[in-house]
Image: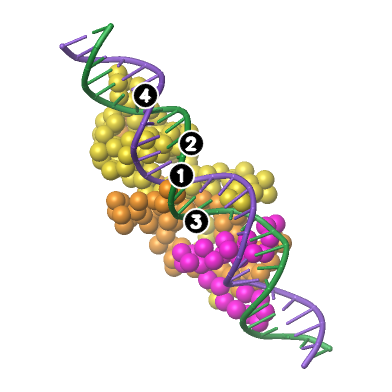
Chain colours: A yellow, B orange, C purple, D green
DNA sequence: TTAGTTCATTGCAATATTACAATTAATAAT
DNA sequence: ATTATTAATTGTAATATTGCAATGAACTAA
């Protein structure tokens, strides 16, 4: 089917899955790391930086933007991308809350 | 193509993406949360708990096990699942390292 | 042995994702 | 106006993912 049955899960579970899914491709991981690394914004050199074709990068950027993790502003002919820090922080809180569950219980197996 | 070009990314980037991908489905998020919630191990009641068909749950468990995040031991006719705490901790460190990047730089847009 | 229980595997259909060539849209430079 | 530059969009092919019915494998109980 290829279609996740989201209606049987909580909003929180679906939200975690949505964030995780966007990190589930190394190109998007790489894009985000690059946006964090550079001090200023990146203006379209992500294509050279990463090595995928321009439409492919554009598509990945679109997904990141759709989830609110990055912003993109037109700057002449190029577009300036950067991390949306506010949204990144709230995403981080949600993901860390999920990852940081108590591991102190006994293992059974 | 549906095939990620992993060879152009670092091992770390691919590793982050692999972990993230497994969290990219609410059923797997739900399974993991359930395994954390109960004190003892779960012995196969995940199908009732979650509401997907048995083969579907089995498939999700297989993916979690393949990545090393859970263990599954046969116990008579049933199978006992629990979090692999050692692996969970190292995965957590990798993911938090990715999520916790410095957000103090100026936004550009 | 036979029947029941539990879970993995197989096979398949439906949908999603990834990648890119070709094109378009928008602006900038001459 | 024409040309160049940059990035989004469209269309398409290849592969991946999700879900489940049917089946199989392994153990238990009678």
Q: Secondary structure at mark 4?
A: strand
Give left or right: position of B8 versus B20.
left
* Mark 1–mark 4 CB contact (< 8 Å): no
Please provide the residue range marked out in magenta.
B50-79
Give the Cα distance between marks 4 and 3. 32 Å
- Give the camera-side residue of B49 and B102: B49
Q: Which mark is residue A67?
A: 2
- Give the camera-side residue of C4 and C29: C29
Give the Cα distance between marks 1 and 3. 11 Å
Give the Cα distance between marks 1 and 4. 21 Å
- Along the polypeptide, which appears first: circle 1 or circle 4? 1
**What residue is at 25 percent from the left and 40 percent from the top?**
A49
Q: Is residue B71 magenta?
A: yes
User: Quick check: B32 above or below A26?
Assistant: below
- Classify the position of the C terminus of chain A by image quarter: bottom right
Q: Which mark is residue A73?
A: 4
Q: Secondary structure at mark 1?
A: helix
Q: Which residue is mark 3?
A: B22
* Mark 2–mark 1 CB contact (< 8 Å): yes
Residue B2 at x, y = what percent? 44, 49
Q: Mark 1 falls within which chain?
A: A
User: Quick check: A58 above or below B38?
Assistant: above
């Amino acid at each position: 089917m290829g279609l996740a049955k989201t209606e049987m899960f909580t909003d929180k579970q679906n939200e975690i899955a949505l964030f995780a899914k966007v990190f589930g491709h190394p190109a998007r991981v790489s894009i985000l790391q690059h946006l964090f690394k550079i001090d200023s914004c990146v203006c379209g050199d992500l294509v050279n930086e990463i090595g995928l074709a321009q439409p492919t990068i554009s598509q990945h950027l679109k997904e990141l933007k759709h989830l609110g993790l990055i912003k993109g502003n037109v700057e002449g002919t190029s577009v300036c991308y950067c991390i949306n820090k506010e949204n990144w922080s709230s995403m981080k809180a949600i993901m860390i809350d999920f990852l940081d569950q108590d591991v102190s219980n006994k293992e059974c197996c």
